[in-house]
Image (cartoon, rainbow, N blue to C red):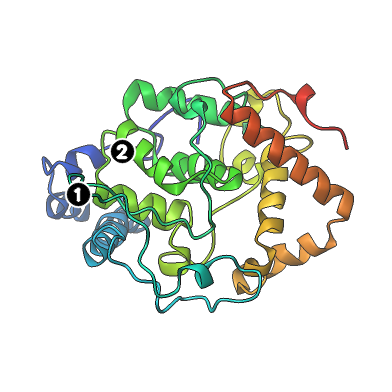
Amino acid sequence: MSVQSTGLFHTRISSLININRLLPDRVVKDVMGMDIPVPSKEGFIRQVLGWREFVHHIHVATDGFRTLSTGNPPVAPGPGDGGYSRWAGKRWPSKRLPGDPDGGAKPSFLGYETPLPPAFWGETSGFACLDHIVSGIWTEGYSHHITRLMVLCNLVTLIGVSPRELTDWFWVAYTDAYDWVVEPNVLGMGTFAVGELMTTKPYVSGASYILRMSDYCERCAFDPKANCPFTNLYWAFLARHEALLRRNPRRRMVMASLRKRDVVRRQYDQAVFSMVRDTLLSGNVIKPEKLPGM
Ligand code: SF4
């Protein structure tokens, strides 16, 4: 992710493919015939033949998660989960109403219902990463998938936004967005809204990951190694879902680190979470001087 390019190493043909002006078969054959390294071919083809076909299958098989029952949860419910046990045997709540045949399913495995903050519609948030990406989206109707996952989906999951609200926003914001594309990617992968149906863990991270994968932090009022709220939001998220995540083998190390985090730091994480969520929801700018005191 870079301020120097909105496309970077991405082809930007997703909009043309998704309206059938380019056919997947054609682009795969073109890439197969190119004189480029095999890993480059593989990286492209598995996105088209692999992930793209998989999310289409998920959409068709579940009618956009509308007909999906959670009677056989991939994770056995446990005490304090607040997750699958609430959903077991039920269908996802749906917005589909008489006269609203296109209303989408509203799964929220983590129980999140916070509205989408105004920053996604162009208000300044004070987070250089978010503000840069959102500005580019409203200019081009596009940002590449790493920005979608690592910053947009990550942040809304960390502050507890309704996955459906983010999904509907994607549908408005991106020129390549269609229900069959957006619902599996945002509900299924980006926000963990259907639990472990499509991914093995929530896709969340703190500031160190964004620092490593971008040049956004150089231009930010926050220091990713000292006071960036993403990191506190990340720890607060892990603490909120500790009972659920500690059973996940892929989370074992980070959950061990969480257990070593002292109570003062945990309280501070929670205070940052409340401040960031409330400030973003009110449409105000988050500034370092507004951070709660330790
Ligand atoms: S310091 Fe934090 S808020 Fe600022 S760009 Fe980096 S990750 Fe985003």
| Residue 108 on image: x %, y % | 47, 56
Q: Which marked residue is nearer to the observer: mark 2 or mark 1?
A: 1
Residue plotted at (21% across, 45% down): 100
| Residue 131, image x, y percentages | 53, 25
Q: Distance between the residues labelled 2 and 1?
A: 22 Å
> In front: 137, or 122?
122
> In the image, which disc is placed on residue 177?
none
Position of residue 27 measured from the top left corner of the image (x, y, whole percent)? 17, 49
Q: How far from the left and from the top, in percent, is residue 292?
A: 81, 32
Q: In this view, does 249 lie to the left or right of 294?
A: left
User: Where is the C terminus found, in terms of image quarters?
Assistant: top right
Residue at the (40%, 72%) spot, across then down = 70
Quarter of the displayed picture in which ligand 1 can be seen: top right
Residue 240, visible in the rendered structure: yes
Q: Within 10 Å of the Cα at label 1, are there few (<14), some (14-19), or many (20+) other Cα atoms?
A: few
The residue type indicated by label 1 comes to Pro
Q: Quadrant of residue 226?
A: top right
Determine which residue is flagged by label 2.
171
Q: Which residue: 16% across, 52% down?
A: 24
Residue 7, above or below 161: above
SS at badge 1: loop
**Could you say which disc has been placed on residue 98 in the image?**
1
The structure residue drawn at horizontal position 60% and vertical position 43%, both measured from the top left corner, is 159
Task: Name the N-terminal-most of marks 2 and 1.
Answer: 1
Q: Which amino acid does label 2 sit on?
A: Trp
**Camera sees residue 3:** no
Residue 80 or 133: which is nearer the viewer? 80
